Image: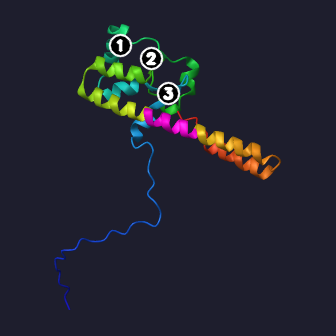
Amino acid sequence: MPYTYTSDPTPARVQEPPFGYRVNPFPDEGLVRRTHTLRGEFVVLESDLATLYGVDLPTLHQQVDRHASRFPGHTLFQLSAEEVEALPVTVRRHVGEAPRAFTAAGVLMLACVVGSERAVAISVRIMALFVRMRQVLVSNQDLLLRLERLGQRSGEGMDIASTLNDLEQIFSPTLRN
């Protein structure tokens, strides 16, 4: 007997998974990989900003040099040899000898100097990412403080202390470079 297709006016039911949906705290993975923590600041390297903003690196250098008064010390800094060495190998391959890192204020100022709509849109996304990273960092600090208090209250419980030590390593607020 052949199967006959009918149009059913009721929509199909979607089966929800028995587990909850996992929400990624950083939905913009491409920007996360280009963000680093140096000197206690969230920064983006100049080579990554040039790529994101759609300009070549010499043009970016020219714009920064031309508008040097707009970039005081807290907006960008030059990486030391030790800081370059601490970067992941995949990042080190793409940076020059003495790359510059732009802080949040530097990212915004550079977008204004470059002046393209793309640069402005990317800088807004980077700023939102920096805000989210700070929120996660603060929440991790609070969690670590609570774990430390719990560990102090446990006193002589060695199993609890070693478990807390493992948890502290898992929830460490240091972000990967």
Does residue 109 sit above or below 20 in this rendering? above
* Pair 3/2: label in front: 2
Where is residue 144, by image quadrant? top right
Q: CA distance from mark 3 to mark 1?
A: 22 Å
Mark positioned earlier in the residue sequence (1 or 2): 1
Amino acid beneath label 1: Val
Please, what is the three-letter code of the amino acid marked with disc 3?
Arg
Q: Is residue 61 left or right of residue 168?
A: left
Determine the residue positioned at 24% across, 24% down: 116
For disc 2, the marked residue is 76
At label 1, counting other C-alpha atoms closer than 10 Å, the crowd grade (few under 14, some 14-19, many 20 or more) is: some
- The residue pinned by badge 3 equals 92
Residue 25 spot, x, y in % from top left: 45, 44
In this orientation, does residue 129 appear?
yes
Which residues are the magenta region?
131-140
Q: Amino acid at mark 2?
A: Leu
User: Within 10 Å of the Cα at label 3, are there few (<14), some (14-19), or many (20+) other Cα atoms?
Assistant: some
Residue 132 among magenta residues? yes
Comes first in the chain, label 3 or label 1: 1
Q: Are the residues tagged 1 and 2 within 8 Å (C-beta)?
A: yes
- How many numbered marks does the figure carry? 3
Q: Residue at x 32, y 13 (%)?
A: 63
Dominant secondary structure, magenta: helix
Indicate whether 160 appears above or below 88: below
Q: Is residue 94 left or right of residue 118?
A: right
Q: CA distance from mark 3 to mark 2?
A: 18 Å
Does residue 98 appear in the picture of this structure? Answer: no
Residue, x 49% and y 33% (percent of image)? 134
Residue occupied by mark 1: 64
